[in-house]
Amino acid sequence: MNFLQTLLAFAVCLGSLIIFHELGHYLVARWCGVKVLRFSVGMGKVVWSRRFGPDQTEWAISALPLGGYVKMLDAREGELTGLSEAEMQREFTRQNVWKRIAIVAAGPLANFLIAIVLFTGLYMYGVEEPSSKISVEAGTAAARAGLHSGDVVTAANGQPVHGWSELRWQFIQSAIDKHDLRLAVDRAGQGRVAATLPASALAGLDLEGDVPSQLGVGVALPAPVVLRVMPGSPAELAGLREGDLLLAADEQPVADGRAFITAIQAAPGKAVQVLLQRAGQQVTVSVLPKPEQAKTSKGTVTVGKIGAEIASRPDMITVPSAPLEAVGKGVVRVWDTCTMTLKMIGKMITGEASLKNVTGPITIADYAGQTARMGVASYLSFIAFISISLGVMNLLPIPVLDGGHLLYYSLEVLTGRSVPERVGDIAQRLGMGLLLTLMLLAVFNDVARLL
């Protein structure tokens, strides 16, 4: 069932973004007076098509689902004989360079526009997420910087922080830029406090992993209190009651509900000595977790369960924005994501970041399925991120991509002459080779992650 859901989520995500990207090319081409012969979702052999509109444009679905294209009336793709002069005026290469630039740039710009629309809608609706209240692990860079568990981060590098996603974003940006991360926090009993994570602590982090956790920062979780006990469960048989504060499992302190649950899951069929506090008194009980099968990313494993609900959900917030504010936030989020993506590409080229960060369709499909299961908001946010990535990648100055064509036309603007056909052909072959190499690397990384 999860496989089918993942496949559907991937198809909806990639398919919709390809359609919007190609619609950008199509609509601007029509606006510029260029005749469009075919609009294809997918590459390779056409498996289904129909003709619509005054130009009888062929709307097609092709065999290879990774990509799409808009085929225009273009003299470079064959002899155009038997056409009237009026139709020849609608041929692509006869358009002035600014029209050609607009047509080529319209695809990536459509991706950015869709991302802005999605983020705007999410900001207006308000997305429930963990608050910016943090936990800090002792002996870590965060602890040395003066951060404490229970601190509520209100600003990072002068930017207001409302929730965990914004805080995590600031951590990632500072790690990429390798500059200090200045935090303003509210601390119980002390009011507003400042703390700084130095650039030296942020340098060398694994940007592919969870950046805040590498510095010792996590989402603050509630104290491990028993919320509910199931009738006839191991928890009830052991004498656990609602309201009990759990202090330790097998003499190992538990800081929060998640830590206690982890300790229980790790002991299927083995008695666990639980130290708890009840009505101001400390009590020790023995609980026998019942072995049960559970599915994880590593397959099916046996875990222990005691039939009790333990407080483990962090403080959650929902912050809706006014329409104009939401649009502004959406534009800023898209801009920040674009710059972060370009910085990561630059670091991979210079060797500062691993080429393992190059991901392909398998990883995208996996994340599409995961976010779809998390909820509509998470899924739409993921689609927006992929849309931005597609826009940025298409603008890279690689021949065969939109960015390569924009490079040609920019040279034409500067020199007053188009790029020689022979030079263009050689560049196309080199670009195709580079693109194929990147695709193979992405698939290799995807398979390596699975294994």
Image (cartoon, rainbow, N blue to C red):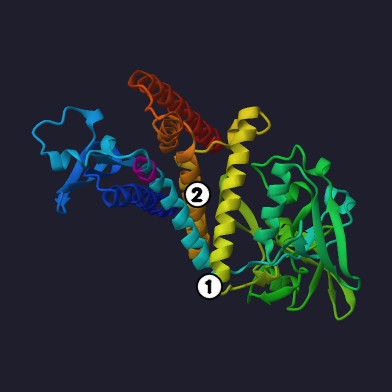
Question: In this orientation, which residue lies closer to the viewer: 65 or 429?
Answer: 429
**Between tags 1 and 2, which lies in front?**
1
* Quarter of the N terminus within the rendering: bottom left
Q: Is residue 362 visible?
A: yes
Outermost residue, left side: 82
Q: Residues within 10 Å of mark 2 (few under 14, many from 20)?
A: many
- Residue drawn at x 58%, y 73% is 320
> CA separation, marks 1 and 2?
21 Å
Examine the rendered structure and indicate whether residue 285 appears above or below residue 390.
below
Which tag, 1 or 2, sits closer to the chain's start?
A: 1
The residue that disc 2 covers is 388
* Position of residue 43 measured from the top left corner of the image (x, y, whole percent): 30, 37
Q: Amino acid at mark 2?
A: Ile
* Position of residue 90 measured from the top left corner of the image (x, y, whole percent): 21, 42
Q: Residues within 10 Å of mark 1 (few under 14, many from 20)?
A: some
Q: Amino acid at mark 1?
A: Pro
Q: Is residue 354 visible?
A: no
On screen, residue 294 versus residue 70, left or right, reads right
Q: Say if the magenta span includes residue 226.
A: no
Image disc number at residue 323: 1
Helix, strand or loop: magenta stretch: helix
- Residue drawn at x 29%, y 40% is 95
Q: Say if the magenta span includes residue 101.
A: yes
Examine the rendered structure and indicate whether residue 51 appears above or below residue 236.
above
Q: Secondary structure at mark 1?
A: helix
- Residue drawn at x 73%, y 47% is 174
